[in-house]
Image (cartoon, rainbow, N blue to C red):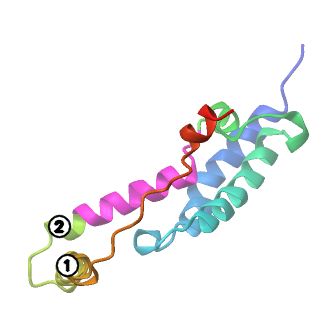
Amino acid sequence: MCLDHKKPLKETRTKLYNSLALPVLLHGSETWTIKARDARRITAVEMKYVRRTAGHTWIDYKSNTQITKELKITQILDKLLEYKRNWIQHVNRMPHNRLPRLMKTLFTNWQKESWKTFEETSGYMRPERVNKWPNCMTDI
């Protein structure tokens, strides 16, 4: 009789990840501005833990999506986007006199107005690129 001793460990570590690590990593993430560098770092922290939980190293050549599917874990960036969507929906349901709703309205109006004034006043037109990639391929 062969017992798989790693399965209970995986299940326990997955439950710990979902109940302890995710809330700590995503605390306040509804209002974060995520840049590509930040996304890579967050994913790296997540995958370091998840790979160890699954019993894989980077030498095993398993992709991040394969490992998260194996453990049935939602990737952290997907969770972060879900939190952001929920926050925006929450702000949209707020009365118009609440501060987050006022800030959202003012900021979006300011963005639209400032972009229009930039377009109207600058007169700058982006020049068309002469050496486009498909054009370069025809010369070969």
x%, y% of residue 29? 47, 70
Residue 55 pos. (x, y %)? 84, 39
Q: Residue at x 47, y 59 (%)?
A: 80
Q: Is residue 122 magenta?
A: no
As rendered, which of 84 and 129 lies closer to the eye?
A: 129
For label 1, the crowd category at 10 Å Cα-Cα, with few meaning under 14, some 14 to 19 and many 20 or more, is few
The local secondary structure at tag 1 comes to helix
Name which residue lies at 55% across and 68% down: 35
Q: Where, quadrant-wise, is the N terminus in this rendering?
A: top right
**Magenta-highlighted stretch: main secondary structure?**
helix
Q: Nearer the viewer, residue 107 or 90?
A: 107
Instruction: Tell me if 9 is positioned left or right of 38 in this view.
Output: right
Whole-percent x, y for residue 74 in the image = 54, 44
Callout 2: 10 Å neighbours few (<14), some, many (20+)? Answer: some
Identify residue for label 1: 120
Q: Secondary structure at mark 2?
A: helix
Q: Is residue 84 magenta?
A: yes
Q: CA distance from mark 2 to mark 1?
A: 30 Å
Pair 2/1: label in front: 1
Q: Which residues are magenta?
A: 73-89
Name which residue type carries label 1.
Glu
Residue to which mark 2 is pinned: 92
The correct choice, above or below, for 4 with respect to 101 in the image is above
**In the rendered structure, which disc, 2 or 1, sits on the residue that comes first in sequence?**
2
Q: Residue at x 71, y 60 (%)?
A: 45
Q: What is the x, y in percent for residue 97?
A: 9, 85
Residues 18 and 106: in front is 106
